[in-house]
Image (cartoon, rainbow, N blue to C red):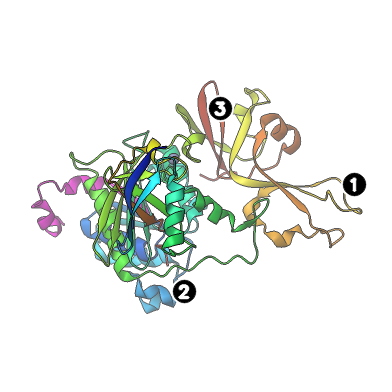
């Protein structure tokens, strides 16, 4: 099984972790781990962004299938829904 | 009037004449909508159409640049239009009090050069996105919280293969939307939407980023494709994300080209000439969930009686309507669907109005989209 070394961080960059993960892990696995380990608000949705390629990492697909490479920085961004009131 | 734009004329890429020919539809005249409208007016756009069903509350005033204490209780679109007209008397401004889905026809949407989505919930975003992607009108979506800002452009007019708003949404979003409903897509009576705090700072950043995406989209060196700008107003960190089209997208997978848009009266069998030429087994998909019948499968008293035919928008009902009107006790089962065979519609519901904004079906390799209209209206 291929393993990849990546950095995961929050959008405000106050949380950052260098991790080694199996390439078979999905985007959703990474988001879930970030929410669990950093106690991010659970009433918010998050998307994952590869800052090197400026592409979103799809939750349902594996990191390796989406071209995530060693040294990539994946950012967990909240999906923002407010704006009206 | 020309003096008004003297400084804009000094910017080599700023095409004031082009801007004067453009028309923006701003959906949602709250905090971000106010900022977008203000910017569009000051930039000197030709036309702004503003739509909002909501009224101004006093707590809106800390984030809404166009509203004053005297506006509390007024419709947001009307009050925003009134204030905007003072910012630029040369801008043509129309306010529409009501819901986007009910008030904006296909024709009205197609008149827009750009749609700004400044609403506060996913369901409204789904609908606006669906209409813009279906009709090929550029869309800019915005979102804020108390520190973060996002603005996304979906250039449907220039790029028919552009990603849509739903292409890159996490599945958890749909689960969150589903929490508003009990099984069967009836609204929960007790559901209270989460209140997300926002500030004038994030609202003004969102308005600036959204308007900038619009303004720069007309430059020759403008980037193609859908993209998202994300900004943290506290740390100043920003990111740009290119948004790819997702073939499995809930919205995009239901749309196919070539597409034919037509209008028809919503009464089934009356003014639907296209019905007659189609095979009866063709599947018709309606844009809105329809409450077709109430059934009582588990009631000893009522289960033998025929299901009560409703054929109305499911959104007009909630959990409280599941109490049986006959026995008053048992829970009724709501049969909610958005797909019908043509034969079923003609056979069971002839002469009745088919609710919903539009319907779609496939015919001879073409996606036919029928905008449903009430008798005599536009
Ligand atoms: Zn899509």
Name which residue lies at 10% across and 51% down. B11
- Chain hosting mark 2: B
**Distance in Å between CA atoms under marks 3 and 2:** 46 Å
Residue B138 appearing in the image: no
Q: How far across and how far down the image is residue B187, in percent?
A: 63, 58
Q: Quadrant of ligand 1?
A: top left
Ligand 1 has an atom within 8 Å of the beta carbon of the residue at disc 1: no
Q: Magenta region: which residues?
A: B1-26
- Chain hosting mark 1: B
The lab-note entry on whether marks 3 and 2 share a chain reads: yes
- Secondary element at image label 2: loop
- Give me the disc on residue B73: 2
Q: Nearer the viewer, residue A85 or B37?
A: A85
Q: Is residue A19 magenta?
A: no
Does label 1 or label 3 sit earlier along the sequence? 1
Q: How far across and how far down the image is residue B319, in percent?
A: 70, 60
Are discs 1 and 3 less than 8 Å apart at CB?
A: no
- In the displayed structure, does residue B228 sit left or right of residue A47? left
Q: Mark 3: few, some, or many residues within 10 Å (few <14, many ≥20)?
A: some
Give the residue at mark 3.
B362
Does label 3 or label 2 sit earlier along the sequence? 2
Q: How far across and how far down the image is residue B200, in percent?
A: 32, 70
Ligand 1 has an atom within 8 Å of the beta carbon of the residue at disc 2: no
Q: Nearer the viewer, residue B301 or A23?
A: A23
**Distance in Å between CA atoms under marks 1 and 2:** 50 Å
- Secondary element at image label 1: loop
Q: Nearer the viewer, residue B33 or B78?
A: B33
Give the residue at mark 1.
B304
- Chain hosting mark 3: B
Name which residue lies at 44% across and 44% down. A25
């Amino acid at each position: 099984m291929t393993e990849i070394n990546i950095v995961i961080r929050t959008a405000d960059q106050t949380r950052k972790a260098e991790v080694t993960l199996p390439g078979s892990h999905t985007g959703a696995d990474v988001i879930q781990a970030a929410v669990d380990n950093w106690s991010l608000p659970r009433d918010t949705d998050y998307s994952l962004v590869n800052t090197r390629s400026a592409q979103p990492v799809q939750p349902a697909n594996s990191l390796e299938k989406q071209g995530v490479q060693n040294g990539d920085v994946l950012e967990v961004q909240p999906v923002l829904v407010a704006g009206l009131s | 009037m020309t003096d008004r734009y003297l400084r804009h004329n000094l910017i080599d890429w700023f095409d004031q004449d082009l801007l004067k020919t453009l028309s923006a539809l701003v959906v949602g005249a709250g905090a971000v909508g106010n900022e977008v409208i203000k910017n569009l007016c000051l930039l000197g756009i030709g036309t702004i159409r503003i739509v909002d069903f909501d009224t101004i509350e006093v707590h809106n005033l800390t984030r809404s640049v166009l509203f004053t204490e005297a506006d509390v209780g007024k419709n947001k679109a009307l009050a925003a239009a009134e204030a905007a007209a003072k910012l630029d008397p040369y801008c043509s401004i129309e306010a529409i009090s009501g819901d986007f889905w009910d008030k904006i026809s296909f024709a009205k949407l197609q008149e827009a050069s750009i749609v700004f989505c400044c609403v506060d919930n996913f369901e409204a975003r789904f609908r606006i996105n669906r209409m813009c992607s279906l009709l090929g009108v550029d869309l800019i979506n915005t979102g804020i919280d108390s520190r973060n800002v996002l603005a996304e452009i979906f250039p449907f007019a220039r790029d028919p293969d552009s990603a849509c708003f739903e292409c890159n949404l996490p599945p958890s979003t749909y689960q969150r939307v589903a929490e508003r409903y009990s099984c069967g897509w009836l609204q929960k009576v007790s559901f209270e939407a989460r209140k997300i705090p926002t500030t004038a700072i994030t609202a003004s950043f969102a308005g600036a980023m959204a308007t900038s995406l619009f303004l720069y989209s007309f430059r020759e060196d403008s980037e193609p494709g859908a993209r998202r700008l994300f900004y943290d107003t506290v740390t100043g960190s920003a990111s740009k994300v290119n948004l790819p089209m997702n073939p499995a997208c809930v919205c995009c997978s239901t749309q196919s080209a070539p597409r034919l848009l037509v209008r028809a009266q919503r009464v089934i069998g009356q003014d639907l000439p296209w019905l007659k030429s189609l095979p009866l087994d063709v599947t018709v998909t309606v844009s809105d969930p329809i409450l077709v019948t109430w059934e009582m499968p588990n009631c000893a008293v009522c289960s033998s009686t025929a299901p009560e035919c409703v054929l109305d928008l499911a959104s007009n009902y909630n959990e409280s309507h599941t109490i049986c009107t006959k026995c008053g006790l048992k829970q009724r089962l709501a049969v909610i669907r958005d797909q019908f065979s043509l034969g079923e519609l003609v056979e069971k519901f002839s002469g009745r109005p088919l609710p919903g904004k539009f319907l779609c079906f496939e015919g001879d390799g073409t996606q036919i989209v029928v905008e449903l209209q009430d008798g005599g209206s536009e």
